[in-house]
Amino acid sequence: MNIGTASELSHLPVKTIRYYEEIGLIEPTRSGNGYRDFSEVDVQRLKFLQRARGLGFSIEECRDLLSLYEDRNRASADVKALTRAKIQEVDRKISELKSLKRVLETLAEACHGDDRPDCPIIDDLAGKSDLDQD
Amino acid sequence: MNIGTASELSHLPVKTIRYYEEIGLIEPTRSGNGYRDFSEVDVQRLKFLQRARGLGFSIEECRDLLSLYEDRNRASADVKALTRAKIQEVDRKISELKSLKRVLETLAEACHGDDRPDCPIIDDLAGKSDLDQD
DNA sequence: GTTAGGGCTTCCAGTCACTGGAAGGTCAAT
DNA sequence: ATTGACCTTCCAGTGACTGGAAGCCCTAAC
């Protein structure tokens, strides 16, 4: 099948699929006219990539997962370890964002938000405030 | 003062400061030897940028905040609106990450994580599992 | 038969916010 | 005079695409 069909089936943009070929994540064959020709297996790989990327795995992690996917003798522990590490990473990001949110909320609450120029948010960014963490 | 000093005072890498000059966020004068010469005001701006970036504002948002910072007639409402929008953005990211975490945890829990090849995580990525969302 | 359209190809450039490195000038101290 | 730290510019790379130009291919309608 052509790239457009593979794109629809995998929910990946055409451009992204070409990019994945460029970096060696898939290797579709070519038809006589030079068009990429995707097999069912290729589409499987694309769907796999689409899901794994959606779960926040980087391209390189996807490469690892793909080879585990295709290794009939893989240990499930390897996959689980990768997943656990990713969970920790997500956790770290969540708590970073939460503390960021707290700071922003403190600032927004302190700001009267009218047409007067006086603004605690700007003051804080300028390092003039009691809310200052520096 | 030289760029190294400005870097220490603002907690921004030297490279970043040069980059900020390139994109017009600061305009230090030059000494006779061609070295950048940073004033106290320049350092203020750099500190401001360091904080705002740390709070997740994009470069373009920082540009806006900087002009509000330097506009003595600004309305604090403008600043507050920007901050509120940023809070919403952070909130969105947090809930995305949380649902991502739930999926990853479900997968990790379902996986026995030993040396057998059978692995629900891989099965899900391959679209074979009951946990499938597609 | 030819023309219009859509899909396909490659290649180059841009995104965001830096970061690294090379090649070379400047300065203070030894 | 020479080291070594610091400064300069310029070019290239990061991650994961995305946009656009120029041009080939295929089908269908007129």
Image (cartoon, coloured by chain):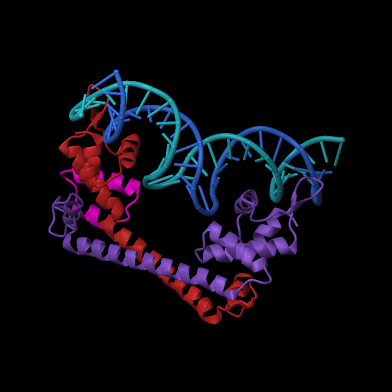
Chain colours: A purple, B red, C cyan, D blue
Q: Please name the residue shown 55% across and 57% down the image.
A: A60
Residue A134 in the image: above or below residue B125? above
Front-lying residue, C10 or A6: C10
Front-lying residue, B77 or A84: A84
Q: Please name the residue shown 39% across and 69% down the image.
A: A91
Front-lying residue, B24 or A49: A49
For residue B134, say whether it is visible: no
Q: Is residue B36 left or right of residue B92?
A: left
Q: Is residue C14 left or right of residue A3?
A: left
Front-lying residue, B122 or A101: B122
Count up the numbered dots: 0
Question: What residue range appears in magenta?
Answer: B56-80
Residue B24 in the image: above or below residue C15? above
Q: Is residue B112 left or right of residue C8?
A: left
Residue A38 place in picture, x, y as percent:
73, 57
Main secondary structure type of the part rendered in magenta: helix
Residue B30 in the image: above or below residue B64? above
| Rendered image quadrant of residue B88 | bottom left
Quadrant including the C terminus of chain A: bottom left
Residue A15 place in picture, x, y as percent:
61, 50
Q: Please name the residue shown 19% across and 64% down the image.
A: A109
Quadrant including the N terminus of chain A: bottom right
For residue B106, say whether it is visible: yes
Tell me, yes or no, whether the highlighted magenta stretch contains residue B86. no
| Rendered image quadrant of residue B72 | top left
Residue B8 place in picture, x, y as percent:
23, 44
| Rendered image quadrant of residue A73 | bottom right
Residue B25 place in picture, x, y as percent:
29, 39
